Image (tube, coloured by chain):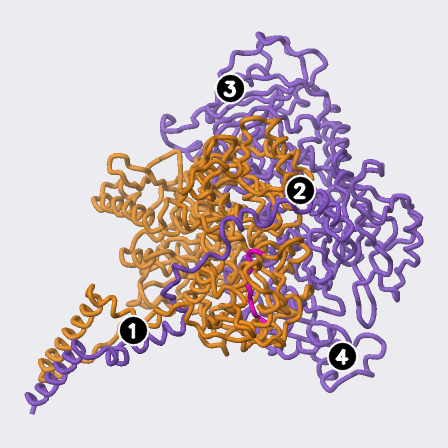
Chain colours: A purple, B orange
Amino acid sequence: MQTRKKYIFLTFLASWLLLFFFGGDQLRRFAFFSSKKAETLRNWPRWADRSLLKSFADAEELEGDGDPPLQSPKARRAARLSVYKKSRCRMETCFDFSRCEKHGFKVFVYPWEKGDPMSDAYLKILTSIEKSRYYTPNPEEACLFVLNIDTLDRDHLSAQYVRNINEKIRGFPLWNDGRNHLIFNLYSGTWPNYTEDLGFDIGQAILAKASFYTESFRPGFDVSIPLFSKDHPQKGGERGWLYQSSVPPKKKYLLVFKGKRYLTGIGSSTRNALHHIHNGKDIISLTTCKHGKDWEKHKDARCDKDNVDYEKFDYQELLRNSTFCIIPRGRRLGSFRFLEALQAACVPVLLSDGWELPFSEAIDWGKAAVVGSERLLLQIPSAVRCIRPERVLAFQQQTQFLWDAYFSSVDKIVHTTLEIIKDRLLPHRSRARFFWNALPGGLLALPDFSTRGGDFPFYYLRQGSSPSDKFTALIRAVSPVLSLSQPVLRLIQAVSGSQYCAQILVLWSCEKPPPPRGKWPQTAVPLTVIHGRTKLSDRFFPYAAIQTDAVLSLDEHSSLSTSEVDFAFVVWRSFPERIVGFPVRSHSWDAGQQRWGFASEWTNEFSIVLTAAAFYHRYYHSLFTDYLPAGLRDLVDRLAACEDVLMNFLVAAVTKLPPIKVTQRKQHKEPGDQQDTAASAGARRFSQRQDCLNQLVDWFGYMPLVSSQLRLDPVLFKDQVSILRKKYRHLEKP
Amino acid sequence: MCASAKYNTRGPALIPRMKTKHRIYYITLFSIVLLGLIATGMFQFWPHSIESSSDWTVEKRSVHDVPVVKLPADSPIPERGDLSCRMHTCFDVYRCGFNPKNKIKVYIYSLKKYVDEYGTSVSNTISREYNELLTAISDSEFYTDDVNRACLFVPSIDVLNQNTLRIKETAQALAQLSRWDRGTNHLLFNMLPGGPPDYNTALDVPRDRALLAGGGFSTWTYRQGYDVSIPVYSPLSGEVDLPERGPGPRRFFILSSQMALHPEYHSELEALQAENGESVLILDKCTNLSDGIPTVRKRCHKNQVFDYPQVLQEATFCVVLRGARLGQAVLSDVLQAGCVPVIIADSYILPFSEVLDWKRASVVIPEEKMPEMYSILQSVPQRQIEEMQRQARWFWEAYFRSMKAIALATLQIINDRIYPYAAISYEEWNDPPAVKWSSVSNPLFLPLIPPQSQGFTAIVLTYDRVESLFRVITEVSKVPSLSKLLVVWNNQNKNPPEDSLWPKIRVPLKVVRTAENKLSNRFFPYDEIETEAVLAIDDDIIMLTSDELQFGYEVWREFPDRLVGYPGRLHLWDHEMNKWKYESEWTNEVSMVLTGAAFYHKYFNYLYTYKMPGDIKNWVDAHMNCEDIAMNFLVANVTGKSVIKVTPRKKFKCPECTAIDGLSLDQTHMVERSECINKFASVFGTMPLKVVEHRADPVLYKDDFPEKLKSFPNIGSL
């Protein structure tokens, strides 16, 4: 039996093989390659003569693309000026660049008085501009003009609506058909269509508007801004609500919405559908019909039940406890809840088709929000469920960064708008997109300093690079050099002994002339004397001579050893965005006096590193001088011992992190303490610092300083091991 | 549903044991079948059979054999393109739907030849480039042959060059496509739009709602978020092999190589040259070349002849001026040469501008500013020029070099609009490979100092040292910020002690029993861990004081994205052996901390368990060693940051510390640890560990100050 079977199979196989070898083409095609053949048929064919095909254009055509004696470029440019106006405005056609060439980017605000009818929000916008470093009171110098007429609310049913703008504007001699004007608007149009009409002729003005439709947005010309409430803070602003980063997100809900449902009219189709995705467990989508006066007229079958459910949940609590928040369009495209969700680190899921997202020219919203489609609402739950936890964490962090960098105050919104416009003026001196979307954000990365990421202290890791391995010492000298034993000369010796020192700059801020070349100590590195004025803020001027990434800022009385300098610099290379230094101070809130207090030495924590001896990135000189408003620098010039506090404020505001203290062999003495032994002088100085602290908090709108409890020491510092094994053994000598 | 959410592993497949008596029989049968298969294979790949195999498929067809379609003169014409079209108004997303792969499906119409009533053809059937483009789409993941499942339709009607087609008839041909439906979800590729005299910047063929991937958009014709701006392909890309040129000085500062410039531009360039001399080179057509040399590949300046495009590599900046059209093929050549393009074409929408950050690769100068070009370019620092050159070359390699690259980038952009939550990131689009390789994107990038109130969870991995474990528990429970204690019981053969025997502590104590005695159990992201901070501590670490642990937690709060630990270790390059070496001696540097006592973020548990590269996790479990080194590698690799060692050195009871006691075991232990470092470095493909010379101490540590006023007095006691 078995053998028979075997033979049958063998014969079968043999015949099959024979068939295969000698069988016809036909058979092979059908029996063996049918699947493959079908596939090739289905794909785009590999034409036999594909190599013979002609190119889509011959070289002459690609090169010449037309006859040269075409319309002259100049004539074409002139012609387009008259064609592309109104809805087709672009910077090239509706903006006068020549106004910005001489004085740079200066903004003029039409004069206004306290009593003028103006909403709080517009008042804040104007105040922000007037306090900004771009403000000019002189219209001759101005590159950009901002009206003193409140154009924020252009819903003519609203109480804030300003009438007869057209007539008013016509009376302005500077109006010039709106050229180089910037118009802010939050609400346009009214019931029932909420069109984008502003109710007056904006001419060639740039529109900074909330709820922009992509169709009417003029790319590269208009700016889309977020909708913000009248209570939005002028400056400073609340921080975001994300305090911990957990993976997977430890939130009670996945996706939430709580808001109005429009029964009729524009936007109702989106909001009417939202209840479909409610599952009562991790997806909460609640709507209410109760709004407006006559809601009961339009009420439908769901309304009563919905209204009951609606009351069961608290909006704030949903916001805090959800990973994603649905941000559907309202009557208009933008809504307050967008910024609310951003602040709450509730990742926005946008259902607002055709909305030109806020600051879309700069911000990459794909990193912080899920841009959904109104039509695909029912897919949203599965789509967000499938987003991997680490991506969710990245989303959450990005919402916090964006909130803090561009949205948390009116000041930031206004400045982002201005910076976006400024970037268009000189394209080659503008920020690449990554500056806007990486910490610390575009407002703090000045393109006038550099357009290259590697020149800033923030992007080393992102670019896989590291800061330069040398530093420049900048010593501020205020007293004349009389003897060879003067501390400043010893300091120069010590610093120049460091293997990382590239050069020493002496900022000569003394009435008396500096000693001649030969009187300075012989150093291995170049020593240059810069003549400064007596202003305190001068020490943070971005001197062209500073070419290294690191600056070692020193007072003439500072006393440091070469070891200390070496070690501090090595530490700084690990923390290039922070101030790394020796003597420290700390701040604290004095509840009794309701003001910030200043604690001097011997504290268990600190928040200020004195710039009498500190390393930091040279970029902070540029930020100090070019970013801070002039008023602040005037303030520190008036007060003694405030400039270093301001520098600490600035760096803390940028990094949100404390400075770093490193080992110091012996306690550094403050110059004041040394000279004026009188207690009163010390006390005066101390109270001045206190004043400074409080005035700076006013300027910033919040207290940016962050405290630290640690000091970085060499790995073997004071360890029970032979001193010979220690690299920084001089730090331990008594 | 979610393709990515599965972490389960497959068990070994079971092989049923067959009856022995049929065995021989089956074996014979199989060997015959095998022989047959081998024979078939040989037959197929035998050289003589290649010719005959190709006609089994339909590939041998010619483009001239495709079916002819006659268009009646009165057949419908689509409406002109609608300038207000956006994805949400003119695109039918329902066709794309939700799918786990987040990929759109693209259908290609089959090739036809279109003729008018008189039999005259409407256009060239298909150009080489369009054929390449369609081939690329059909070979890609986007392709589908099922017209009903398609989300995007690509007509095979070639409209790359408007000059080669008849506008009205081409439009009619489009309108009769089977799924045309006003052009909804149809994608047209065009590189040379417009025609004389005024050269429109978008394809003139009426196309209704169709998306246009166009090569010369101006800001007025480009529908942002709907159209895709693509490059004008330069056929030289395929012909000339131009190796990437490294950084370094180049002969010319500014080079202009375009041949048909408007005289007005030409005179402006010449003015520049007159002012700045040799560093500016303006090339033009060669007039006195002998026959037979293709003029395309030569450029001349006076009597000097230069090879094109090779000459572009000699220049730092290359001018790309607009011609009659905004998009210029020369841009592709310039990028290929790694020359920084200076784009002078007002209102031009640069290729793929939706995703590419052109500011990193080019200098855009308004036409009116042309006279200032030299000074503007002089202000670009050398290092930035080098980065731009690298970036330019990368753009060419990734998005310009072939029709395939152009096609796939276009489809990806549309794909990203439809599945924005799965979109490719800015970094992936823009960072050249070298940057991608060396850069790190810290998953905990937000500078947050977690609130102290949260506290930390201590995790003690234990096997059977109950007595010592209890002592650790008692010691750790004294730390003020401890919020929970988790004991991971790694012994499957023995039950943990009864509840009543455990020390009574003020925080919740949980015991987790594991299924297998694996070291990686220590790093599992247990749900019981409710705090961000985790303190991993061995069951024999009893020498750390409460002050030291509390201080460690405070340091971690300031560096929540790092490993903050007590005993530090170092890796060194052994020059003799040419490999890495593990070092536990008293050194001035640290690059690792032992996780026998270390604080870190719970997120790293998640990474360790699910995202550890290569086979490291299994390797560690198999060797029962080096889990801490693996963790150090992982964290350093993902954050690019060093560890923080806290507080002075103590004598720890740890495997290698016993070396002092002279046990022979330790030599092998050290060798094993060194091996781990070498193994991990090869799996990671790099050495991610960062060496630092500092450690963290309390601010007033060892300062001459009353101890009782210090926050952490009990530090460093032995």
Whether discs 3 and 2 lie on one chain: the answer is: no
Label 4 sits on residue: A263
Label 3 sits on residue: A496
Where disc 3 sits, the SS reads helix
Label 2 sits on residue: B366
Is B191 one of the magenta-colored residues?
Answer: yes
Please state if A86 lies on the left or on the right of A641 as rendered: right
* Labels 3, 4: front one: 4
Amino acid type at circle 2 is Pro
Question: In whole angstroms, how far apart are the C-alphas of marks 1 and 2?
Answer: 58 Å
Residue A353 appears at what percent x and percent y? Answer: 67, 67
* Labels 4, 2: front one: 2
Question: In whole angstroms, how far apart are the C-alphas of marks 4 and 1?
Answer: 64 Å
Label 1 sits on residue: B56
Label 3 chain ID: A
Amino acid type at circle 1 is Trp
Where disc 2 sits, the SS reads loop
Where disc 4 sits, the SS reads loop
